[in-house]
Image (tube, helix red, strand yellow):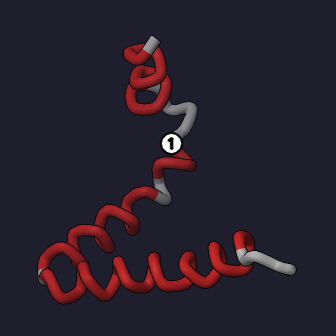
């Protein structure tokens, strides 16, 4: 089953338009991990908004 999924994604051209969006994401990941400071900034940019979201969702409202 896993090989079937791999085959459909990477061996056929069915998802080629979708995989075209992966290129810039790969470049961004390579860019941010090229310098550890950038990786920490990217991690903070992802984590900090989620902390606020979790606070709003799971706040103890009395």
**Percent coordinates x, y for residue 52 in the rendering:** 61, 84
- The residue sitting at the top extreme is 1
From the viewer's perspective, tell me whether residue 19 is left or right of residue 39. Answer: right
From the viewer's perspective, tell me whether residue 15 is left or right of residue 31. Answer: right
- 37 above or below 61? below
* Position of the C terminus by quadrant: bottom right
Q: Nearer the viewer, residue 22 or 62?
A: 62
Look at 26% across and 83% down and name the residue there. Answer: 40
- The residue sitting at the right extreme is 62
Which residue in the structure is indicated by mark 1?
16
* Secondary structure category for the residue under label 1: helix
Mark 1 Cα within 10 Å, few/some/many (few <14, many 20+)? Answer: few
- 61 above or below 15? below
**Percent coordinates x, y for residue 28 in the rendering:** 32, 73
From the viewer's perspective, tell me whether residue 59 is left or right of residue 38. Answer: right
Figure label count: 1
- The residue sitting at the left extreme is 35
**Percent coordinates x, y for residue 31 in the rendering:** 22, 77
Q: Nearer the viewer, residue 35 or 15?
A: 35
Q: Nearer the viewer, residue 34 or 60?
A: 60
- 48 above or below 54? below
Look at 49% across and 24% down and name the residue there. Answer: 8
Look at 55% across and 38% down and name the residue there. Answer: 15
Look at 14% across and 81% down and name the residue there. Answer: 36
Q: Which corner quadrant of the image does residue 29 belong to?
A: bottom left
**Percent coordinates x, y for residue 38 in the rendering:** 23, 86
């Amino acid at each position: 089953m896993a090989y079937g999924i791999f085959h459909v994604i990477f061996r056929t051209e069915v998802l080629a338009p979708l995989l075209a969006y992966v290129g810039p994401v790969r470049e961004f990941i390579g860019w941010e991990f090229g310098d550890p400071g950038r990786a920490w900034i990217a991690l903070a940019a992802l984590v900090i908004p989620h902390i606020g979201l979790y606070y709003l969702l799971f706040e103890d409202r009395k």
